[in-house]
Image (cartoon, rainbow, N blue to C red):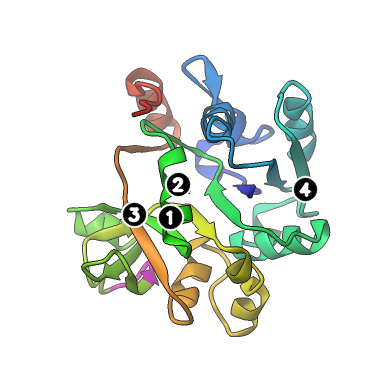
C-alpha cells in the first residue's frame, strides 16, 4: 500500500507563518503535523512508501524533512508556484500516479490535520471491506456542513451519495480528507476527471466514484483538529492531546 499525502496547498489563511514554509511541517506540541501522521500510519506496517505531494515552492522543505525519517519517503513536486496556479487535489493525485507509475492500493490523506485517534484503524477497516473507503463524522452545525463533503449512507456503511460543499446538504455526515482507494479504483482517477468530477477538493473524486462502485464509510472514532488560521493553530497547540491508540 502507498500513502499519498496531499501537501501542495499554500495555506494562505496562515500567512505570514506559511508564506515561505509549508503548513504540514509546522510543529504541534513536540512534532510536526507530518510526523504525527507518518509515524502513526507506519506503526501498522501496511504502508511501504509515503509520497508527499508538494508544490514547487515548498518541495525542498519536504525533501530536507524526509532525510531524517526512517520510512521510505518520496517527495513529488507538482511544478506549481502560486495559489492561483495550483492543480487541485484530484489532479495532484493523478499527476503523482502518472509520474511514479503507481499501481497499488492507496491511502490518500490531507497533510495538514492532526488527529487524536490512529489512522491504523481506518486502514484495517478498508482492508476488511475490500472496497474504497472514507471516514465520516456527525456535524451538527449547518454552516459547517456547507463547507464540507457530505455523505448519505445505508445501514451497512455503504455510501449512497456524496456532495462537496452542497448548498443543500442531505445529512449531517461529513467526510474528512482521509480516503482509501483500492488498486482498481485508483486506476479510475483520470476517468473521473475526464467525466467532469471536481478537482480542487480531494473528496470530489470519491463523490464521483461512489456512483460507479461500492464505497464504505467508517465512523470517525475520535476528533480531527483542523488548523485553518492562526487562531485555530494556537488553540490546537494548547489543546491537542496526541494520538490515542486503542
Say which residue label 2 marks. Answer: 124
Mark 3 vs 1, N-terminal side: 1
Mark 3 vs 4, N-terminal side: 4
Q: Is residue 138 left or right of residue 208?
A: left
Between residue 60 and residue 171, name the one nearer to us: 171
Looking at the figure, which quarter contains the C terminus? top left
Part of the protein shown in magenta: 163-167
Q: CA distance from mark 2 to mark 4?
A: 26 Å
Mark 4 vs 1, N-terminal side: 4
Q: Is residue 212 visible?
A: yes
How far across and down, in percent of the image, does residue 132 sit?
Answer: 49, 64
Circles 2 and 1, Cβ within 8 Å, touching? The answer is yes
Q: Residues within 10 Å of mark 1 (few under 14, many from 20)?
A: few
Q: CA distance from mark 2 to mark 3?
A: 11 Å
Circles 2 and 3, Cβ within 8 Å, touching? The answer is no
Say which residue label 1 marks. Answer: 128
Label ID, residue 164: none
Residue at image location 21% in from the left, 61% down from the top? 172
Say which residue label 3 marks. Answer: 218
Residue that lies at the very extreme toward the left in this rendered image:
140
Report the mark closest to the observer, 2 or 4. 2
Circles 4 and 1, Cβ within 8 Å, touching? The answer is no
Amino acid at each position: 500500500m502507498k500513502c499519498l499525502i496531499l501537501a501542495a496547498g499554500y495555506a494562505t489563511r496562515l500567512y505570514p507563518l506559511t508564506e515561505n514554509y509549508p503548513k504540514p511541517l509546522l510543529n504541534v506540541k513536540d512534532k510536526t503535523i507530518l510526523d504525527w501522521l507518518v509515524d502513526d500510519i507506519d506503526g501498522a506496517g501496511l504502508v511501504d512508501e509515503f509520497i508527499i505531494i508538494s508544490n514547487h515552492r515548498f518541495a525542498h522543505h519536504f525533501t530536507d524533512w524526509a532525510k531524517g525519517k526512517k520510512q521510505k519517503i518520496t517527495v513529488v513536486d507538482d511544478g506549481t508556484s502560486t495559489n492561483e496556479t495550483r492543480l487541485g487535489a484530484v489532479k495532484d493525485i493523478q499527476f503523482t500516479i502518472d509520474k511514479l507509475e503507481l499501481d497499488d492500493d492507496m491511502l490518500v490523506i490531507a497533510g495538514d490535520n492532526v488527529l487524536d485517534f490512529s489512522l491504523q484503524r481506518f486502514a484495517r477497516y478498508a482492508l476488511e471491506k475490500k472496497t474504497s473507503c472514507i471516514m465520516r463524522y456527525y456535524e451538527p452545525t449547518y454552516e459547517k456542513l456547507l463547507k464540507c463533503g457530505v455523505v448519505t449512507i445505508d445501514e451497512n456503511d455503504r455510501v449512497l451519495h456524496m456532495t462537496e460543499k452542497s448548498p443543500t446538504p442531505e445529512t449531517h455526515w461529513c467526510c474528512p480528507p482521509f480516503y482509501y482507494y483500492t488498486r482498481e479504483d485508483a486506476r479510475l482517477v483520470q476517468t473521473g476527471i475526464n467525466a467532469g468530477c471536481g478537482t480542487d477538493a480531494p473528496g470530489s473524486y470519491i463523490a464521483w466514484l461512489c456512483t460507479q462502485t461500492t464505497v464504505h464509510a467508517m465512523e470517525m472514532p475520535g476528533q480531527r483538529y483542523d488548523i485553518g488560521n492562526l487562531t485555530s493553530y494556537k488553540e490546537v497547540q494548547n489543546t491537542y492531546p496526541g494520538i490515542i491508540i486503542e
